[in-house]
Every structure is written in structure tokens, then in C-alpha cells.
Amino acid sequence: METPGEGDAEPDVPEVLPVDANWYFFLFVYYGIYLAWALIFVTKLFDLYRLNWWPTTLGGSVSYFVFWIVPLLVGLLLHAFELDGFGTRRHGAAKPGDRARSNYDWERKTTWVALALTPAQKTFLERQLATRMPKSYKRFLWFMGTFTLSLFALVLGQGFATIYLSTLPHSNLDGVVYVWTWILTVQCLNGISNWILQNKVRSRALVFVFRFYYFLVYHVFYRNLFARLRSPDQALYIQLLSSSWVIIWYPVSMSRTFHRFLRWAVGFEKDWDEYADNIGTMLYLRNLSENVTMAAFLGWLTILHYGPNKPLYPFFSFDSDTDPYNYRLTAIASLIIWATELVSSFLARGVIWYCYRLDVTNVSCSPLALGSYAHSGLH
């Protein structure tokens, strides 16, 4: 007679894979690609003001490679000496129980990376392979697409500024066309990024961050336009149109009538409360980017005008005796524009509170602001 447990078969636990595909795939594909794009992004940011982030003795190519490979090598060393916290998962024994099963599941997620298929297998197993690709990797690819769009926005901004500089002088109408063409361009890129982050990546925090980023990109090049205008009237016309848009558009777009129109026209699915919160968040991010970029503009305007790099930035030197649009006038006009933006923001928030009883600041600063999706673009 068997004692209890003698005839019980041990659970069939699959053998832990000998190849740690997860870690190396994450290091070289996830983090490696992200780091490469991030370095390009940083380079373009410095390039806006004709600056380099790398040491002159090394040069750009060598510095780029060094700053890319060193973090990967650090990751490899941490993993080799099991200082990264993945050692128990990588070397976990295949014993009965939850821990062995979780080890196997963790190891199994990216085993498709190590598959070496013939062309015939790839042809007939395409559908099966699609199901083996981790959802996290798909989201990562979509995120990298959004990251590419954000870098493209920066390059486009430089292109707009270059074209505007190469065709001076401009009329008041030219300045308005320049600004609103740039607004529409950023709005389209932001709309595409929002759709990807909401529907493919599904990261609410990233939606919030990327919206703020596109507002910053828009206003950075908008501020630099002030140093290239040749009369106060141009700045006045452009700013009056922009401020009027803020006061009118945000309260109108938040109305229930406009919300019903979106549901009828494009099949908008969000209820009005969530929609209104997102419009308020957009206004908050716009105001925040206005304040950040204007303070930064006045700072770099002063530093570049009085600093040692003045010869490299002729449009910030204001050395022409025949041009009345000098440093003093630029700074005063910028401060007036900043005050106009603060007033238009205050009025727009006041109208929203009066009509909808919605506090823009509280809604946007609430943790729930990161948890709501919206299909509206950058306005």
C-alpha cells in the first residue's frame, strides 16, 4: 500500500531556457535604440544655438559612440556580476511551485528572438510568429515612432527658422503666415503622437509629457521669431491674433455643443466630463509652456547679447545703428507680449470657470490628469 504522496507525479515544469534572451534583448534593442535616438535628440537641441555637447578633442562621432557604448557596457557588467536584480530569475531552478513557473514564464516571453527560421518557415509561420511577439515590444516600437516624430518636429522648426531668416525682410502678413503655418505643423505632429500614445502605447503619463513637449517646441521657435521681427507692429498683430484665439477657442471647444459635434462628426467616444478635463489640461500646458519659454528666451537673449559668444549670433547682437529694433526694444516688446499672454490665459480660465465651473489648474495638477485620454490635438 502506497503512503500518501508516493505515487504522485511531480508537476511538469518546463526546463528553464539556457539562453537569457530577455536581458540582452532589452539592453541592446530596447535601451540601445532608445539611447541612440536620445543622443541624436540632445545633439539637435544643442544645434539650435550652434553649440556642441562633446569635447573638441574627441569630436562628434567618437563622443557619440562612447556615450552610447559606455552605458551598455555598464549594463553588461552589472548583469554579469548579478548586481541588477535579475540573477534569481536568470538562474532560478526549475522546481515545483510558483517561483519556478514564474521564472519560466518570464524567460519564455522573448524566446522568439532566438528563433532561427528558414525562409520557408517564415512564409508559413507568419501568423504564428505574430502571436509570439511580446506586446511590450510592439508598444516599444510605437513609442519609438512617436519619439521619431518629436525629433522630426525639432528639425522642422529649424527648417522654418532657416527659411524665414533667408528671406528677410518680411511684411506683417508674412509673419502671421509663418506663425500659423508652424502652429498647424506642430498640431498635426502632436495629433499623430497623441493617437499613437493613447491607442498603441497606452501610456497616459507619456500623453501628458509629449503634449507639453510639443507646446515647448512650438513656443521656442515662436519666441525666436521676436528677435527677427523688424517692427513692433508685426509682433502686435501676431500676438493679438494668438491671444484672441486662446480666449475664444478653448471655452468654445469645451462646450457641450462642440462635444456633440465631435461625437457626430468623428465618432468621439469620451464623455463630456473627461473631454472638458482634457481641454482644460491642454490650456494649462499651453500656459505653462508660454511662461517657461518666455523666461528662457529673455535669459538667452540677454546672455547671447552680452556674452562672449555674441559674434556667433548676429540676430541677438543688435549692432546695427540704423535698425531701431535693438536689444532694449526686443526685451520690452517680449515683456509686453508675456503680459498679454498672462491676461489672455486669465480671461480664458475665467470664462471656463463661469460657463462650466471647471478649475483649469486643479484639474490639470490632479493625478487624474495623467489618467485621462483625449483625442483632441494641440490648439
Image (tube, grey):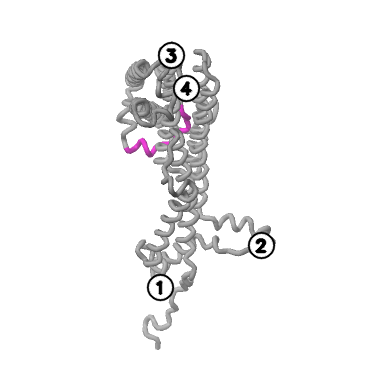
| Lower sequence index among marks 3 and 4 | 4
Magenta residues span 367-378
User: Comparing marks 2 and 4, which lies closer to the viewer?
Assistant: 2
Q: Which of 150 and 46 is in front in this view?
A: 46
Quarter-wise, where is residue 312 in the image? top left
Q: Is mark 3 on a helix, strand or loop?
A: loop
Give SS at disc 2.
Answer: helix
Q: Dot 3: within a 10 Å radius of its alpha carbon, few (fewer than 14), some, or many (20 or more) residues?
A: few
**Which is more N-terminal, label 2 or label 1?**
1
Q: Callout 2: few (<14), some (14-19), or many (20+) C-alpha neighbours within 10 Å?
A: few
What residue type is disc 3 on?
Asp
Percent x, y of residue 198: 47, 39
Rendering coords of residue 239 (x, y %): 42, 16
**Residue 259 locus on image (x, y percent):** 46, 25
Q: How far apart are marks 2 and 4 (CA)?
A: 53 Å
Residue identifier under label 2: 121
Q: How far apart are marks 2 and 3 (CA)?
A: 72 Å
Q: Name the mark nearer the viewer: 3 or 4.
A: 3
